[in-house]
């Protein structure tokens, strides 16, 4: 598996994952802007056997990063794809001078919460009715101190 930074040419692969696995997918216009690197966005994809099997995005502003989305194809789950994407995002944030990364995750998405906790994220607070189906847990991670995964 390889993790690479996405470009506009990855639109179709990323849009497919976005619309298939995320309850509130970005519009095509917003996704294309993020793929172009506008407004501090960077998207990374996981490629396995020539196929995009996952992607994740982050926006860095000043000394903070915000993970926007992470989606992994259901056939590639529990194979380290999500972990590799989160590590690429954390590394990118360190390179950009971020000191802390934030994200929102559906409170009932225990698999995603465990993934983020494995990478040093901690629950900070809840956002009521953030998603159409319910609340979000806001999680954060300090990144300049350690980029390593917990054992």
Image: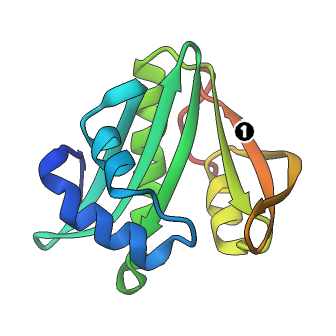
Looking at the image, is 57 positioned above or below residue 59?
below
Total number of numbered labels?
1
> Quadrant of residue 145 in the image?
top right
Side of 113 where 44 appears, left or right = left
Secondary structure beneath label 1: strand
> As drawn, which residue projects farthest toward the bottom?
75
> Could you say which is closer to the camera, residue 120 or residue 126?
126
Give the image location of residue 70, x and y in percent: 48, 58
Give the image location of residue 77, x and y in percent: 44, 78
Side of 81 where 36 appears, left or right = left
Residue that appears at 62% across and 19% down: 99
Looking at the image, is 61 positioned above or below residue 29?
above
> Quadrant of residue 51 in the image?
bottom left
Side of 93 where 138 appears, left or right = right
Question: Alpha-carbon neighbours of circle 1 within 10 Å: few (<14), some, or many (≥20)?
Answer: many
Residue that appears at 53% across and 20% down: 61
Looking at the image, is 75 positioned above or below residue 108?
below
């Amino acid at each position: 598996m390889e993790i690479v930074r996405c470009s506009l040419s990855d639109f179709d692969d990323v849009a497919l994952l976005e619309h298939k696995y995320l309850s509130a997918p970005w519009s095509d216009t917003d996704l294309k802007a993020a793929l172009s690197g506008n407004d501090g966005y960077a998207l990374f994809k996981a490629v396995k056997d020539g196929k995009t099997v996952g992607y994740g995005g982050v926006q860095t502003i000043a000394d903070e990063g915000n993970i926007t989305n992470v989606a992994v194809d259901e056939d590639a789950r529990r194979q380290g794809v999500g972990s590799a994407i989160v590590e690429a995002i954390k590394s990118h944030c360190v390179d950009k001078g971020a000191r802390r990364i934030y994200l929102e995750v559906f409170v009932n998405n225990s698999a995603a919460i465990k993934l983020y906790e494995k990478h040093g994220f901690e629950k900070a607070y809840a956002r009521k009715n953030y998603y159409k189906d319910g609340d979000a847990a806001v999680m954060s991670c300090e990144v300049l101190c350690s980029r390593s995964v917990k054992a």
